[in-house]
Amino acid sequence: MATKQPGFEESMARLEEIVRTLESGSEGLDRSLKLYEEGIALVRSCTERLDRAEQTVRQLQLGPDGSVTLTDFGSGDA
């Protein structure tokens, strides 16, 4: 059975936990490296999710003539 990938919020919470642990210096080198690798994987996963989400977001813009147009997120001057 395939394991379910954690959601974005869960991934971010785990990433914050990893950062706190690494910043505390409480772990040895081997454990710190494993945590670092896990953190990098989480950053990549979250970045991919954000990129996919950005591609699906659409922005309504009001034109000078009062018309409303649907445009891709980030493509307008707003």
Image (tube, rainbow, N blue to C red):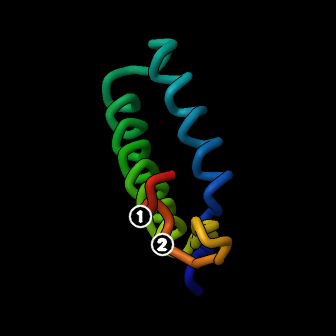
Q: Nearer the viewer, residue 15 or 51?
A: 51
Image quadrant in which the N terminus is located: bottom right
Disc 2 marks which amino acid? Asp
Look at 44% across and 54% down and name the residue there: 77
How far across and down, in percent of the image, does residue 13 sit? Answer: 65, 42
Label 2: which secondary element: strand
Q: Residues within 10 Å of mark 2 (few under 14, many from 20)?
A: few
Q: Nearer the viewer, residue 69 or 5?
A: 69
How far across and down, in percent of the image, does residue 58 sit? Answer: 58, 72
- Occupied quadrant, residue 59: bottom right
Question: Which residue corresponds to mark 1?
Answer: 75
Look at 63% across and 70% down and name the residue there: 60
Instruction: Give above or below for 63 relative to 27.
Output: below
Residue placed farthest to the bottom in the image?
1
Q: Residues within 10 Å of mark 1 (few under 14, many from 20)?
A: few
Question: Which residue corresponds to mark 2?
Answer: 72
Look at 60% across and 32% down and name the residue there: 17
- Occupied quadrant, residue 15: top right
